[in-house]
Image (cartoon, helix red, strand yellow):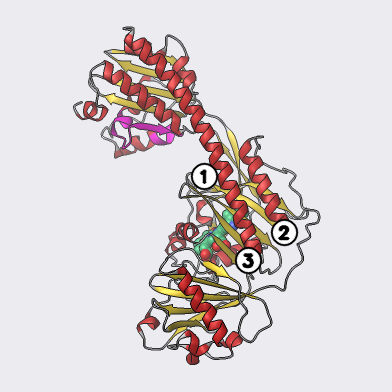
Amino acid sequence: GTPPTGLDLSECEAEPIHLLGHIQPHGYLLALDADATRITHVSANIAGFLGQPPEAVLGKSLPDVLEAPVAQRLVDLIRGIGTRAGPTAATAVCPPGSSEPCAVTVHRHAGRLFVEVERLPAEETAPTVPALTAVPDSLAEMGDDVLHRLADRAVRAVAEETGYDRVMIYMFHPDWSGEVIAEMRRPEMVPYLGLRYPATDIPSQARQLFTLNLLRVIADVDARPVSIVAEPGTAEDAQAPDLSLSGLRSVSPYHLEYMRNMGVAASLTASIIIDGELWGMVACHHRRPRLTPPAQRAAVMRRVGDLVAHVKAQEQMEAVRRARAVDFAMGRLDRRLSEGQDPVSALLMGDQRLVEDLEAQGAMVAADGAMALVGRCPSGPVIARVLEMAARTDGPVFMTDALSAEIGAVGDGEGPNADEPVVGVSGDIAGCAVLVMSRAPLVAIAAFREPESRNVFWAGDPNKPAIREEGKERISPRNSFAAWRERVEDRSRPWERWCADLLTRAGTAVGRHVGADNPAEALGNA
Ligand code: BLA
């Protein structure tokens, strides 16, 4: 996880960023009640667009306040989205009394209809993209793998189609820290490629919003946010409208400070969602304020769609390949068991096979009163402790890539054997994957992996993701993103899901053989 910090960062997660009650000033917002008859909220800048102050618009209907053709167009749009909640439907229409191009977006959320009208940049000629660089000026070792090639292709396309100064693919790790896995940037900008960012840089409520609202443009970090007003004294006035799906929603002051610290004036961020989970983001930075027209946003979304399709196809191919290998190993095990071999030798296949199948360096197998170890294994007491933890684990298989940290926690007085001395893990083993089918008699399979030392390069000291500045009521994001090297020595390669599959299936086969055909039951009876 993210290393500890002296500061309490919970105030970041507590900020209700969908209820800040402001929008960015490059457009205006109207909110209507659910049947779209009454305007309940307007942004305070509406006079600059409609020529009427908020109090002249609140409580009225769309045809009351807009020219007939524009009102009609909006009513049609609203009818078009029906009662559908969720992502925005967008189209461009002419704004009333203006020659500037605008885009109108309509969506329904939390019992309200939202109409957002954005001022757009005058029609841009296709952005010229001189001297962008994608030279993998990387700090981390970049494998020549498919994922990086796909991500490289995506950033190149997005940079060419939008003209942002820097375009990145940011991929989340399981602890929600993230890594820039592909980058295009102007050559004079410092590279972020290969750098890691702590989870607190994008707090959970911000990540949650990115699963609902897939694209965000921040047009100008220094723009003054515009408040949203309701009729005084009404129910609507009591609480800020829920802007979760709004495209104009103003930006958390924490994040504005973060952007300034990075030297970013404008950004576009798009979610990369795979199987319903936020997998990563396309993050675009610009050093000057920048509005991005709908056509470019749509182009980014198409690139994201391509990337998702390719990453999924790649993951599926990998899953099929792994499943085949697991099937193969299981076929061998079943054959040996049915030939009457005892389960321990059947599992070990008489050699290093189990160890190889699990891409591990050691393994332990126990069944029918026998136990065998092959390859590199931790000491007896550590194995005993690991079996104990595995028997208490929630899922069927207990997996960790940081064994010494886990064992340490048990020795901290939380475990049942708090009086026992803490069992040290030899430096030889850092990870284990353990399945305990039954404790008495012991039926268990464990695999062990050695530590793999590696460097992680963080964008700034990960122990200080934020700072408290003298005399400021809010904490501030860190102001240095300079590469900070963390040397990781005591972790193994993480266990993959297929390892759990292989262990579970092997355990079930052996359990059947020794008469414990329901693993949960066998464990419960122990
Ligand atoms: C939001 N932080 C974000 C967003 C990104 C990052 C992409 C979403 C921005 C958007 O909505 O357009 C972080 N940006 C990054 C990272 C890179 C990048 C990692 O380009 C890497 C290259 N942030 C902090 C701290 C706090 C914090 C300490 O660093 C809180 C105390 C908060 N970040 C924060 C909040 C948001 C955010 C609240 C949501 C902003 C909003 O939607 O209004």
**Horizontal and vertical percent position of residue 205:** 45, 60
**Mark 1 or 2, nearer chain start:** 2
Q: Residues within 10 Å of mark 3 (few under 14, many from 20)?
A: some
Q: Amino acid at mark 1?
A: His
Is residue 491 visible in this depiction of the protein? no
**Mark 3 or 2, nearer chain start:** 2
Q: Residue at x 27, y 13 (%)?
A: 368
Which of discs 3 and 2 lies nearer the camera? The answer is 3
The answer to whether 54 appears left or right of 503 in the picture is: right
**Mark 3 or 1, nearer chain start:** 1
Residue that badge 2 annotates: 165
Q: Residue at x 62, y 63 (%)?
A: 259
The answer to whether 259 appears left or right of 526 in the picture is: right
Give whichever of 222, 402 is nearer the camera. 222
Residue furthest right in the image: 130
Q: At numbered mark 2, what does the secondary structure look like: helix, strand or loop?
A: loop
Q: Is residue 377 magenta?
A: no
Task: Indicate which disc residue 173 carries.
Answer: 1
Q: At numbered mark 3, what does the secondary structure look like: helix, strand or loop?
A: helix
Task: Indicate which disc residue 294 carries.
Answer: 3
Q: Residue at x 78, y 55 (%)?
A: 188
**Horizontal and vertical percent position of residue 240:** 42, 76
